Amino acid sequence: MAINAALTSLTWKGTAVPAVGSASISISRAALDITPIGTPTQQYIAGVSGATATLDLFFDEGDAPHWTMLTDINTATAAGSLVITLQSGTTVTGNAFVTSYEITAQAQSVVRANVQFQYTTDASSTATPVQIA
């Protein structure tokens, strides 16, 4: 059965983020080359996993969470909780840093903001950066 992609909610540091147009998550795991010198074919092992998220917001200067994410680029010293909940009830949860915040405005159009996050874990953690439940 396909998952309905409709967002039910999105929270940043425990606060609901309004006016989210879309959200995407990218989870990857690099392949590490371990090919011995002189071997005719390449050999790999699985590396560490990582994840990023991107939000497309309908920017509103009056929405505190929009400003919190913007100021976190320069001021945050610790990762914050980012939780995306789909209409199906599936949640994507992890701790992340805001890495980019781009505001775009066109004449006679809605002002948009594109926000990018890098998920992280504690240095001693063996957990994956994103939990999906």
Image (cartoon, rainbow, N blue to C red):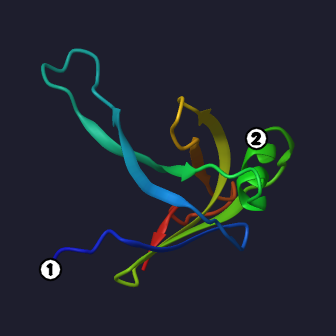
Residue at x 45% of width, y 56% of height = 23
Q: Say which residue label 2 marks.
A: 73
Residue at x 18% of width, y 21% of height = 39
- The front one of 128 and 96 is 96
Query: Which quarter shows the N terminus?
Result: bottom left
Residue at x 77% of width, y 51% of height = 67
1 or 2: tag closer to the N-terminus: 1
Q: Position of residue 59 (x, y in %)?
A: 63, 49
Relative to residue 49, is residue 5 depicted above or below?
Answer: below
Q: Give the residue type at disc 1.
A: Met
Q: Residues within 10 Å of mark 1 (few under 14, many from 20)?
A: few
Q: Position of residue 35 (x, y in %)?
A: 27, 27
Q: Say which residue label 1 marks.
A: 1
Q: Give the residue type at disc 2.
A: Ile
- The front one of 93 and 45 is 93
Q: Residues within 10 Å of mark 2 (few under 14, many from 20)?
A: some
- The front one of 10 and 80 is 10
Q: Position of residue 93 (x, y in %)?
A: 54, 70
Q: Position of residue 117 (x, y in %)?
A: 59, 47
